Amino acid sequence: MRVLLAGATGVIGRQAVPVLAAAGHQVIGLARTPIRLPDAEVLAVDALDRAAVADAVRSARPDVIVHMLTAVPDPVDPRHLARDMGPTNRLRTQGTANLVAAAGGARVIAQGVAYAYDPAGSPVKDEDAPLWHDPPAEFGPELAALVEQERRVTWAGGLVLRLGHLYGPGSSFAPDGGFAQRLRAGKVPLVGDGASMFSFIHAHDVATAILAAVERPAASGVCNVVDDQPTLIHDWLPEMAAMLGAPAPRHVPAWVARLSVGEWGVTYMTRMAGASNLLARRQLDWKPAYSTWRDGMAADLGIRAS
């Protein structure tokens, strides 16, 4: 199939291009700036330019459009989440609208997130669980953008892959990424009870999920793409620090942390829900190569997981 991959040069795109090409698909990439990739032709297009997107889609003649466009800074300032996520929110709204409008008969697969579920109730959510009813104010614009993106994609008969917390080469959680650097510097404390439940996903596992979705045209709606073992932050943060050779995270009461990182920063560390991958396993016949973040990070570090 001809696959138009928007975001071909990003963290996920660089993993997905060779995976799709190795499976025999012809990949045409979209990126804001021109770049050469060994397994794909790349078109330089601003996804917010509706006419340019329409021209690129006509030129590419795709069977499937895969939308993995983001513009997330590393690091994100939790006190200014709405500001830092503003460019990504526009890609999720205006960029998605442009791609869907230009799609014609092409199916659309888009990137969502699996950590926007309302934290009430079970700490691990499936796709039927509601999204956040009353999120912290800083998360409100991001949630609104995600809801609009999912509405556009699913209305068009497409599929939204709700991704867990992304790690792997080029990500903030990579051994040389922004989060890892702050952890080594002792700047990531364990806040409050550390009760946030995280579901991670390695970028290469996202790439294989994209391949599975491309090859299953009946798949539609929303689908969590996460690893097998949701993990509380009070368990994974100290272990990740040890793997990275960082000092053990100090404990900071929530009220103290709120003074420096705001309500969203505290919420991120204490109230997030995890997600289940059972639907992806069933609907896409997919499973992650890295069952836990520990396995994937050990592979990235070149060490054996304990």
Image (cartoon, rainbow, N blue to C red):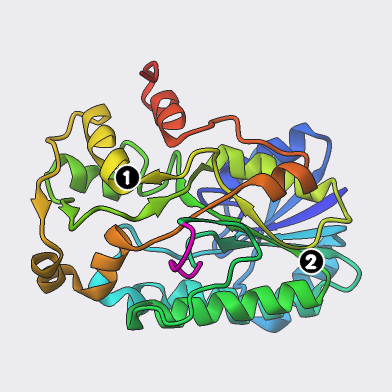
Instruction: Determine the residue positioned at 39% across, 76% down.
Output: 139
Name the amino acid type tagged 1. Gly
Q: Which is more toward the observer, 282 or 146?
A: 282
Q: Distance between the residues labelled 1 and 2?
A: 32 Å
Q: In this view, does 8 lie above or below 115?
A: above
Q: In this view, does 204 lie above or below 10?
A: above
User: How many residues crowd mark 2 within 10 Å: few (<14), some (14–19), many (20+)?
Assistant: many
Question: Which mark is on residue 177?
Answer: 1
Badge 1 or badge 2: first in the primary sequence: 2
For numbered disc 1, what is the local secondary structure? Answer: loop
Question: Which mark is on residue 158?
Answer: 2
Q: Which is more toward the observer, 276 or 163?
A: 276
Instruction: Determine the residue positioned at 69% across, 82% down.
Output: 50
Mark yes or no: residue 244 visible. Answer: yes
Residue 121 falls inside the magenta stretch: yes
Instruction: Determine the residue positioned at 75% across, 32% down.
Output: 22
Task: Give the overall secondary structure of the magenta segment.
Answer: loop
User: How many residues crowd mark 1 within 10 Å: few (<14), some (14–19), many (20+)?
Assistant: some
